[in-house]
Image (cartoon, rainbow, N blue to C red):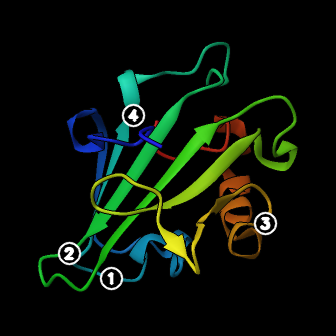
Amino acid sequence: NTSFKDFKTWTLEKTNNGPSPSLGEAHAGNDATVVRKVYFKNGQSRVDGKYPIGTIIVKHSTNPAGTVNEITGMVKRGNGFNPTTGDWEWFMLNEDGTIMLDGGKEVRGGASLMGGMCNGCHGKAAANDFTFSK
């Protein structure tokens, strides 16, 4: 799958520095040194309050010490894929944009990914089509 390839060349929509208590442990939310960069493929924006099917977003969380290097992605699927959170699918990614593997299986999903952790947090942003950055 090449959906996330070259994500660092996409439109950088937002950079967040330091702790974000609302994130908790997600995206290194408790780390005072973390930098979170959010990229949107093709600079996609909402249309009538919702992102179009096929919208792809990547968040890359790092820190200067190199102890944080987390890359997560989300894709707008539509068609009732994950209705609890606007049909988004969540991903854990490798540095090259490939989908991370765990036990030979891709780390991805809708409501089931990591016990629904993604749905739980992103549910707080329902008014922004379940996104926080734009």
Q: Earlier in the sequence, mark 3 or mark 2?
A: 2
Residue of label 3: 112
**Residue at 41% of width from left, 48% of height from top?**
58
Q: Amino acid at mark 3?
A: Ser
Please state which of residues 57 and 33 is positioned toward the viewer in this rendering.
57
Name the residue nearer the viewer: 133 or 111. Answer: 111
Residue 27, by quadrant, is bottom left
Q: CA distance from mark 3 to mark 1?
A: 26 Å
Label whose residue precedes the other's in the sequence (2 or 1): 1
Q: Nearer the viewer, mark 3 or mark 4?
A: 3
Local secondary structure at mark 1? loop
Q: x and y percent of residue 128 in the render?
A: 64, 36
Q: Is residue 76 above or below residue 107?
A: above
Tag 4 or tag 3, which sits nearer the N-term? 4
Q: Residues within 10 Å of mark 2 (few under 14, many from 20)?
A: some
Horizontal and vertical percent position of residue 90:
61, 54
* Between discs 3 and 1, the one toward the N terminus: 1
- Residue at image mark 4: 40
Separation (CA) of disc 3 from disc 4: 24 Å
Q: Residues within 10 Å of mark 3 (few under 14, many from 20)?
A: some
- Kind of residue at badge 4: Phe
Residue assigned mark 2: 63
Q: How far is the residue under mark 3 from the one under mark 2?
A: 28 Å
Q: Are marks 3 and 4 in contact (CB under 8 Å)?
A: no
Residue 31 is labelled as 1
